Image (cartoon, coloured by chain):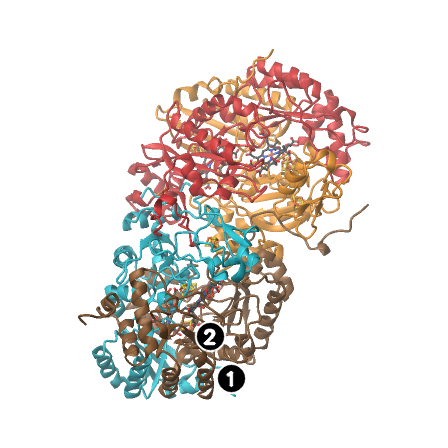
Chain colours: A red, B brown, C cyan, D orange
Amino acid sequence: MANSDTPLLDELEKGKWPSFVKDMKQAAQKNPMARDLIRQLELSYKDKIGHWKHGGIVGVRGYGSGVIGRYSDRPDLFPNVQAFHTMRVNHPTGWFYKTDTLRKLCDIWDKHGSGLTNMHGSTGDAILLGTTTNHLQACFDDLSSAGFDLGGSGSALRTPSACVGPARCEWACIDSLDICYDITMTYQDQIHRPMFPYKFKIKVSACANDCVSSIARSDLSIIGTWKDDIQINPQEVLTYASRINIQKEVCDLCPTRCMEWNGRDLKIYNEDCTRCMHCINLMPKALRPGKEKGATILVGGKAPIVKGALLSWVIVPFMKLEPPYDELKSLIERIQDWWDENGKSRERLGELITRLGMRVFLKAVGLQAVPQMVKAPRTNPYVFFWPEDIKKEVK
Amino acid sequence: MANSDTPLLDELEKGKWPSFVKDMKQAAQKNPMARDLIRQLELSYKDKIGHWKHGGIVGVRGYGSGVIGRYSDRPDLFPNVQAFHTMRVNHPTGWFYKTDTLRKLCDIWDKHGSGLTNMHGSTGDAILLGTTTNHLQACFDDLSSAGFDLGGSGSALRTPSACVGPARCEWACIDSLDICYDITMTYQDQIHRPMFPYKFKIKVSACANDCVSSIARSDLSIIGTWKDDIQINPQEVLTYASRINIQKEVCDLCPTRCMEWNGRDLKIYNEDCTRCMHCINLMPKALRPGKEKGATILVGGKAPIVKGALLSWVIVPFMKLEPPYDELKSLIERIQDWWDENGKSRERLGELITRLGMRVFLKAVGLQAVPQMVKAPRTNPYVFFWPEDIKKEVK
Amino acid sequence: MAKTDIGPPDYKTMLPPVIQKNYGKWLYHEILKPGVLMHISQSGEALYSIRAGSPRLVSTDHIREICDIAEKYCDGFLRFTSRHNIEFLLDDKDRIEPLIDELKNRGYPVGGTGHSISNIVHTQGWVHCHTPATDASGPVKALMDEIYDYFVTATLPAHVRIALACCLNMCGAVHCSDIAILGIHRTVPKVDNTRVPNVCEIPSTVASCPTGAIRGDMKNKSVAVNEEKCMYCGNCYTVCPAMPIADPDNDGISIWVGGKVSNARSVPMFSKLAIPFLPNNPPRWPEVVHAVKNIIEVYATHARKHERIGEWINRVGWERFFSLTGIPFTDQHIDDFDLATETFRTSTQFKWR
Amino acid sequence: MAKTDIGPPDYKTMLPPVIQKNYGKWLYHEILKPGVLMHISQSGEALYSIRAGSPRLVSTDHIREICDIAEKYCDGFLRFTSRHNIEFLLDDKDRIEPLIDELKNRGYPVGGTGHSISNIVHTQGWVHCHTPATDASGPVKALMDEIYDYFVTATLPAHVRIALACCLNMCGAVHCSDIAILGIHRTVPKVDNTRVPNVCEIPSTVASCPTGAIRGDMKNKSVAVNEEKCMYCGNCYTVCPAMPIADPDNDGISIWVGGKVSNARSVPMFSKLAIPFLPNNPPRWPEVVHAVKNIIEVYATHARKHERIGEWINRVGWERFFSLTGIPFTDQHIDDFDLATETFRTSTQFKWR
Ligand code: SRM
Ligand code: SRM
Ligand code: SRM
Ligand code: SRM
Ligand code: SF4
Ligand code: SF4
Ligand code: SF4
Ligand code: SF4
Ligand code: SF4
Ligand code: SF4
Ligand code: SF4
Ligand code: SF4
């Protein structure tokens, strides 16, 4: 290492946390692209600036999305990353793998790309990090043969994602995995062929803990909940009482203060419960979600560009979700149609609703206004009336 | 009353609450303006519409404000209210009166106007309700001789108002009356001669109960507070304990939950107290504001037109306020200068700050940013840097 | 010529001797009974304030009657409160009851202190203004007749402060009231193309519209209103008299709830929309009176002690407010102005009803 | 030709038998120790998930190593978590310790469960993107080295979720994280008038600017940036490559705190600005590491059990956050974008420090 050509990055091989630099070097040993990548990154560390040009449009036949084009701005120094496009591969729902399938992905990527990946990208795809333009189609063909397909990019439906849900979690109020997979399969066309004003993201969390950050990171958020009473196992409550301070840790932190604990019995005033999950989280063996399960549907979540970040807004407080999920899909389609018709280029759904008004949106997609949609009613008196509310003018 | 010409209004003579209709009729008995006023009002009750034209500009010599011009749109029916202007008379601060002074006001108004008034208008003036154009100056002259002056209207400083404060209230942390009177006298010119982009209101409440709604209804709100510890009289706490439930009514409703009550001693963690007044309100004999008194200065409050209603914003967490109030007045002047220079016509101070940014405002008036100014720091990443923060560009 | 810029009479000359002596030295107060405040000074001296209701729109004879009473019982000292009530100021305890008797005999309600409904802050309405969508004094009188008992007692969970403004200018500053009654127009202003060119300044008229519904109409040297964007605020009319907006068939009243001004317990809050529209039904506005009374009664039944209306709603949730009052929730309750997104529910935490 | 639109491999074929049998029938779980989850089904069967940290940027050989391990202990079943960790899924309790030993030997941290700091969600940085203001993997590695113990234990008051995004596009969706690390530019984009006319669409470039800082420059068939209105978001560069914004001397990192996503106890919240700027100091970003660690430690010392960072700050107040952490408050902390007024203090309720 005396005369390493990556002295700065070498510093990041130190320390206890697994080092991406080790992985890059590992890949670099057998792959020239990876070798130039780490050398270019070293230059960035020295210069404190990125060395990629503004992306170009590249892709595979029949698709408009799934590949992010990328070119080095120093091909003179790093010819092997002159073109270095990533492919977004749709992981199995819930990121579950049997190793044989995962190994296939590795083999394909060693054959066609840099041998470097992100497991996974922040939308949830397997990110295959860097290949040349002329490898793209061949790589896709091999992926397809192995049973893989690309995820979304550009103004398309992005790869939907779901929490681990009923596969492992006792709190799942909906089958997040099945819903996500069903949507993914139903809307393959929208994922692969950008046809919207901008990107559209869907994420499914099977309870209000929202382990895929659905409310923060998707235009359409599906979050499991229930309508009836929390199921209590009084025996197990007593067991927990010996381990945790139920009054302080559970009741006092209940956002609606709708629980009463007298040292023996736990009483929940369910009509006041907002199903936040806290008490259930703390005493999973004693408390369970109710039996009448379904989901809250929210829309509009997104990152700050352009008009500021948004968290998704409740538009359907409760929807039963059972295959074939027709009610859900019909809603999604009505929403996308309206967005498609009214949205400007690069205008996310949440921004469009902000621009035209929730009132107009609800009417267009055929939803009834309910108090659950708001934290509080409006404070400004700038209230519109529909023409039908107004008496005919008397001349 | 068989053939009353005001059958609708007559209905409002009934009922237990004092009736304005009775007062109108009383005035109408001796005053033709009042007589036509009640008849025109009856027509409005019948037609469900006002019968005044859009106001015109009228006034008294040397002043640009203090009179609201008004003309009937049915002078054919109600000739005595063809012109029916109101005069805004600056009440003594705190609305205190010795009857002889008040009687003078009545005499003058019987001589020059309708004999009807509002005691008081919602800004705080005595509203002398309706006179003709040619009576205005004479009325003013008589008012002036009697020691009265007009209040503000139009794009002027409006009549400042103050809570009863140290005159009667044990909680006054500042001399609201003296401050208000001092400001009123100092800024006579700004009150009488509109010279601002729009109206400017100042209200002074001597504690956080804000009995003149300063935070909601003034461009500059002055609200008394203290810096040190709440004064406790433990003996009196015990007395209250026999009358109220201190835990439930006081401690549990403390917004910062900074009080502890063990049935004997009341402990306040003053560093967490936000001086909301609640505990003091409930136990005035036992608890008192601290000794290091002053005011929080806030700006921007206003009604909805144009950009939506605003509550005032903290700009100076604590200012000592003692005569001659130079620090306060210098601040007011810096603020008004900046507003005057940058404000568009009909743009309130709060709207201007919203448009140009708090950052720009603070710099212009020379105030340091402190966390007390915000509920929370910004969430959007659209952060400006002053040129001096930036390194020189390296070419 | 008359002196100008003399300012108001000096308040110090208006203070009764007991205040002059104890100015800034008050120690505590007690509400002896509704409408009767006792303030005790460090010196031990007491000031009694007897609060009486007022219709606000008063004749000079009415004021003289007040003066008569004040002279009889209070050495001529009185004041008005920030909510238009009258306060008789005295230091002689023995005169309290006679004063109250006389007030009652003359029809003055005594109360408005503590957990009561005090006077309704209100505005001009059809009595004097040019932009009202309803009257002010009339609805106030009709309502106060009906909720009179809440003024003369103090039986509510907390203060209830009601205000009325007759148009969106909101002179009554209703925007932070426990219950706000607000006159609203519901149809777009009618542009009079013959007058606009003469009486209006086009750019400031265009700029006056909060929702950008007005554009210049060069051909007619006038302006045109986009009906879809207009929410009938009437601000254009304030700026341009040739755009009248009053409409007898469609003007009316909206009801807002849950605002407050004090910093006690909770921070100051805006009032929020409860009922988008009730008709103007003079002389006694029964729909408005009924709606407000219903809200007060539901609140009185369900709120905890010391909980203002907005604090109660914040605790139980707006879902519950609508289900308990039986007021229908509509798309008009959902904000669509500038800060609308801040009011949308960004959580799965809500109640079913 | 390859088949298109086949979608991802069916997840059902990837589930270990114990999950297939107990799908949807889980009854409860326990965290046996950091990184080790036990889920018990109605049938009584148990599933064990062993969570290991990952640098996220991994080589195929690394993945094969994971596969080797999974085959050795888990019959080949594993998954990735929503925060990029690896979970080994097994039903044989006896294999847990050997698996953990092997993981430790190979340098995999085991943890990230319960009241720990889990993996840092992050983005591309200088490794692959065209708009970064900092690197992603580098600062993450440097920071995780330093706060490693919080990953392998669960000693904090509550979960701490950290995310990093290398530019304002915020791919890491850092906007709702307990602690967010955000790459920022601080100088205006440089318009290349020779290229704009060829590579950019002027109207969409103008429209891309959140603050309206860009206007068309007709003369040059290009655009011009108003330096006073530009806050360096870089969105124009996304739309128009001829407006590069990266600046080695002035790019760097800002720190945001107090966001969360879950609905547990408190509603989801955005992260708020803590530190407007820290320099890019590769390879180990010591200023950033130090600043984040300080925040974590102050939080760990002062928060109550189950209190997320944002919940703690909401309880004690931002005044207290700044005084406890020693972070200076500046005018940059005060919002000046569209919803700014909603963040201003509209109350006299605040603390002195
Ligand atoms: C690869 C990935 C980051 C990562 O390393 O994980 C990524 C990378 C890019 N994102 Fe992203 N985004 C990625 C997840 C996200 C997320 C998180 C999510 O989906 O949960 C967000 C925030 C959520 C959201 O969508 O609002 C996100 C918000 C953006 C934005 C801002 C969009 C907005 O409306 O605010 C842009 C800008 C744009 O679209 O022009 C953007 C644009 C980009 C581009 C395409 C750059 C550009 O300006 O064209 C980046 C390509 C990087 C490269 O060279 O590979 N990326 N991007 C993530 C996708 C991987 C995957 O498919 O799994
Ligand atoms: C008389 C009074 C109502 C009353 O009956 O009490 C009143 C009456 C008028 N107000 Fe007001 N305002 C009155 C207190 C208020 C208040 C309350 C306050 O000052 O505490 C407000 C809300 C606080 C504020 O200023 O934001 C208020 C907010 C307005 C507005 C909206 C201003 C805004 O920025 O949103 C307008 C519209 C305008 O200025 O063009 C307005 C305009 C008017 C005009 C001048 C009508 C107009 O469009 O030109 C009214 C004249 C009525 C008349 O014919 O006599 N008035 N006005 C109040 C003044 C009496 C006094 O001097 O004591
Ligand atoms: C006389 C007056 C001041 C003035 O200069 O005129 C006044 C006087 C007192 N106020 Fe007030 N307040 C007066 C208007 C207000 C207002 C403004 C308003 O209503 O328009 C407020 C803000 C209302 C709001 O929050 O919306 C106000 C909020 C308070 C509070 C806080 C109440 C709360 O819990 O939110 C207190 C404390 C208390 O009553 O315990 C208070 C307490 C008091 C005390 C007890 C102060 C004292 O020790 O003397 C006085 C008697 C209160 C009573 O009526 O029970 N005063 N008080 C005003 C009487 C108006 C009336 O005729 O009804
Ligand atoms: C595996 C994973 C889901 C997946 O499909 O991949 C998962 C799994 C579990 N989550 Fe989660 N959560 C996962 C990401 C999340 C996220 C998303 C994120 O961090 O990006 C959140 C929202 C975070 C936020 O609020 O900012 C999340 C908020 C929760 C909560 C609520 C925590 C809170 O009090 O705010 C719980 C409840 C708890 O832990 O008591 C929870 C509880 C759980 C439980 C206990 C559910 C169960 O019974 O199986 C699982 C083990 C928790 C643990 O790690 O201690 N999970 N969980 C994700 C693991 C990520 C990781 O590797 O660290
Ligand atoms: S979101 Fe709920 S159901 Fe899904 S994994 Fe997390 S805790 Fe379980
Ligand atoms: S789920 Fe949340 S709101 Fe409901 S009882 Fe439990 S802690 Fe309270
Ligand atoms: S604002 Fe405070 S000091 Fe002034 S009268 Fe009200 S309670 Fe007393
Ligand atoms: S003044 Fe308010 S915050 Fe302070 S101790 Fe009393 S109730 Fe608590
Ligand atoms: S609220 Fe409107 S109508 Fe009523 S007095 Fe004020 S400006 Fe006139
Ligand atoms: S009434 Fe209001 S919204 Fe309608 S055009 Fe006039 S100013 Fe605009
Ligand atoms: S956050 Fe910005 S720089 Fe980082 S990957 Fe996303 S778009 Fe690229
Ligand atoms: S960097 Fe952002 S703010 Fe600056 S000009 Fe470009 S788009 Fe506008």
Q: Quadrant of residue D63?
A: top right
Would residue C144 appear left or right of B99 to someone viewing this image? Answer: left
- Residue C21 % position (x, y): 41, 87
Chain of the residue where label 2 is placed in the rendered structure? B
Q: How many marks?
A: 2
CA separation in Å, label 2 and label 1: 17 Å
Tell me the amino acid under the disc marked 2: Val
Q: Is residue A310 above or below residue B36?
A: above
> For the residues carrying marks 2 and 1, which lies nearer the camera in this image?
2
- As drawn, the label of residue D317 is none
* 10 Å crowding of disc 2: few (<14), some (14-19), many (20+): many
Pointer 2 residue Cβ closer than 8 Å to ligand 2: no
Residue B365 seen anywhere in this rendered image of the structure: yes
Tell me the amino acid under the disc marked 1: Ile
Chain of the residue where label 1 is placed in the rendered structure? C
Element carrying mark 1 = loop
Q: Which residue is mark 1?
A: C6
The residue at the point 59 percent across, 51 percent down is: D274
Task: Give the farthest residue toward the top.
Answer: D1
Q: Which residue is mark 2?
A: B67
Q: Quadrant of residue B21?
A: bottom left
Q: Are tags 2 and 1 found on a single chain?
A: no
- Residue B76 % position (x, y): 36, 69
- Residue B87 % position (x, y): 43, 76
